Image (tube, rainbow, N blue to C red):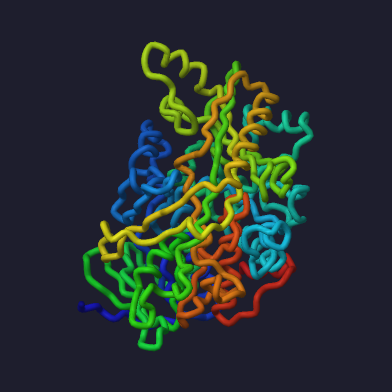
Amino acid sequence: MHATADPHVDAVIVGAGAAGAAVAWRMAKAGLSVSVLDRGPWLNQQEAANSRDDWEWVMCTDHHPDPGIRKAPADYPVTADDTPIRPAYYAGIGGSTLHWGAHFPRFHPSDFKTFTLDGVGRDWPIDYWDLEPYYDLNDQIMGVSGLAGDPANPVRASRAMPPVPLCAGTQRLAEAADRLGWHWWPSDSAINLDQDGLGRNCCNQCGPCGMGCPRHARASTDITYWPLAIEAGVTVRPEATVGRIETDDDGRARSVLWRDRDGAWHRQAADLIVLAANGMGTPRLMLHSTSAAHPNGIGNRSDQVGRHLMHHPTALVSGVFDESLGPPAGPFACALYSQEFYETDRGDTGAMRGYQMQAIRGQGPLGTALGGYVTRLDWGGDHHRQFENSFQHTVSLTVTTEDLPEPENRVDLDDRAEDAAGVPAARLTYRVSENSQRLLTHGIERTTGWLREAGATETKVTALSRQAGFHFLGTVAMGEDPDRFVVDPAGRVRDCPGLAVVDGSVFPSAGGVNPTSTLQANALRLADLLAGQTPMRRGRAEARDMTT
């Protein structure tokens, strides 16, 4: 195969999402020449369908989070026959931050030491305090609204902006939590509410954040990290489909073979190859990149690549209220959360670790009719009555459980389908563990009681959200033991010099909250180590200074 040789660079990064963007900027700031390849395009969020009358239909079709429904040109095939949770991700410059809800919690200190504390899962080779300055730095770049002082979490710097306002439904939840004596707190959200210095418009509470933000109020890395990275000299190549990682006879990673939008092949050589293609795409590429030195795939000497897949199994309970709660305005997933049952309490839950409860605002008319969150309304003579009782009358709570790493849950290859570069489909094999099921059951009971306390006259339960495969974690985990962990604490693949992983694949544990804040903070830490820089230590002033 003829492949055009691209100019040699210090580092080439595969993936332009949450992790890839952060690492590219950080490495370029350290003086490295950096090239980034992503199979997706640049998107103009100002052309998003949010203001169109058919925005809900667009969310159900062309902008659906499931690639099996969306079928965008940049999507690679995924076999999901052997999992109850469908994949949800997005390919493009900005990755899945293009279509996320911008809920931005941090891990608890206990999430980094689950085996030490509870005898389950796997400890991280670092702790919360190692990431604290990187959390602060990332908050500055992404632009976070919220309220400092949450008693369920360590003390942190004041948020740059106040929290997203509560609506009528979430206000009822807050008051009910107070009566129950439960923890609740306004969400940290990567949404611009009033900070002119970000160079982005403020949120106007229009609501459908999951398909992009025409105002650029909701943060995504195409409008936060990428302008900074490009200014620092990073080269970004959109619609670049990677075919394999190439190694020399000694097993060292030397180059990336990739195909451009016109079908021409290129070879990008680099001193360091960095994978940031998420916890499904990264092991997929590593398993496909076989050679004499890596007959079972790069990094797969101990058959650990792709194993220990962790999601966040999620239940959802919706409360129906007699009185109107108003139209579905405001960011749909950013209002308030409760971590009342976040830490292990086996006597109460019957399980190890815990879960977060998160408020979800009401849906639009089509989502209400189709049951986007909950059971579809009946069709027929009673449909209109059910619709009138539900539309603008609901608020929901999710139960986001901590998944534990199990080797049988995995990503591997399915040769029955392949993408344009010849890489086989990703195949998902996953079962909800007994521990996660106990957490879900407990959470459903507690959220049902919370909604009833808030005044709901009816509750509707989705025991496991099939469309909640947003997070792919743990499939190329980092740790100290070379027989159990594919990458070392600096993100380097142990049996393949010149190759590193920086995305959610490296998470030894999943926590019970959305991972993006932790993913980006860890990616910044790994970027420093891979670029030969001294890691940042605690000190918020230093974190703020590093943004300039």
* Left or right of 169 in this view: 239: left
Residue closest to the eye, 18 or 497: 497
Quarter location, residue 377: top left
Q: Can you see residue 450?
A: yes
Q: Can you see residue 225?
A: no
* Left or right of 203 in this view: 120: right
Q: Residue at x 36, y 34 (%)?
A: 57
Quarter location, residue 166: top right
Quarter location, residue 332: top right
> Residue 94, image x and y in percent?
45, 58
> Residue 248, image x and y in percent?
36, 86
Q: Residue at x 20, y 77 (%)?
A: 1
Q: Residue at x 75, y 48 (%)?
A: 152
> Which residue ends up furthest to the top in the rendered image?
381
Label total for image = 0
> Residue 396, image x and y in percent?
58, 32
Residue closest to the eye, 315 or 152: 315
